[in-house]
Image (cartoon, helix red, strand yellow):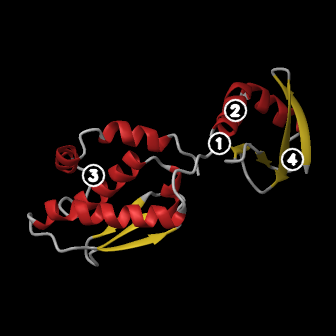
Amino acid sequence: MIKHIILNGRKIEYTLQYKSVKNINLRIKGDGSVHVSANRRTPLDAIEDFMHKKAHLILKAIDNCQKSELKEYFTEDDLKRFILLSCERVYPYYAEKGIAKPEVKFRKMVSKWGCCNITKKTITFSTNLKFAPAECVMYVIWHEFTHLLVPNHSKAFYLELEKVCPDWKGCRQKMKGIKI
């Protein structure tokens, strides 16, 4: 059911759903919508008191969702061409280290920018990389290729990544700001 509440002077619409749960659960989705679930025995006053206590976090999360307007840096076709050409330029570094050329694939991924399957020798890139600037796409390419040398996120992995992508920390930080 749709409800409304005033939090710090702002009228907020939220969806309340009664479920078989022990606690009051609060979620702010990527579009800024607020969802609350609670046990049927929980009075509305208790739910709204909970929301007032979390008002600062709720409003901050809503504002962050509204700020994160996605900018498309590439069309999907241009992204694929850019990645394939970049992989051709990046690969010789890894070939010198005895790494077989991986197959490059694409698919829409929401929680990852890329993944490397070492046993199948494939690297898959998210088509959502179209929302990242070119230097960040390059960081993801270097990151995934580096997994062919070091399959985990150990210190050795990051030392190897730093050799080919010195600004990996800055790029990773930018990538965290892109909300899909």
The residue identified by callout 2 is 63
| Closer mark to the observer between disc 2 and disc 3 | 2
> Real-space Cα distance between discs 2 and 3?
32 Å
Question: Of circles 2 and 4, which is in front?
Answer: 2
Instruction: Give the amino acid type for the residue marked by disc 3 in the picture.
Output: His
Q: Residues within 10 Å of mark 3 (few under 14, many from 20)?
A: few
Q: Circle 1 is placed at which residue position?
A: 69
Which residue is denoted by mark 3 in the rendering?
A: 153
SS assignment at label 1? loop
Q: Nearer the viewer, mark 1 or mark 3?
A: 1
Label 4 vs label 1: CA separation? 39 Å
Instruction: Assess disc 2: are there few (<14), some (14-19) or many (≥20) residues with their C-alpha within 10 Å of its C-alpha.
Output: few
The answer for how far apart the CA atoms under marks 4 and 3 are is 46 Å
Q: Would residue 104 be seen by someone viewing this image from the given angle?
A: yes
Q: Secondary structure at mark 3?
A: loop
- Crowding around mark 1 (Cα neighbors within 10 Å: few <14, some 14 to 19, many 20+) is few
Tag 4: Cα neighbours inside 10 Å, few (<14), some, or many (≥20)?
A: few
Question: Disc 1 and disc 2: Cα gap in Å?
Answer: 11 Å
C-alpha separation, residue under disc 1 versus residue under disc 3: 30 Å
* Rendered location of residue 97, percent (x, y): 9, 64
Q: Which residue is mark 4?
A: 41
Left or right of 101 in this view: 129 = right
Q: Residue at x 84, y 43 (%)?
A: 14
- The amino acid beneath tag 2 is Asp
Q: Which label's residue is closer to the chain start, 1 or 2?
A: 2
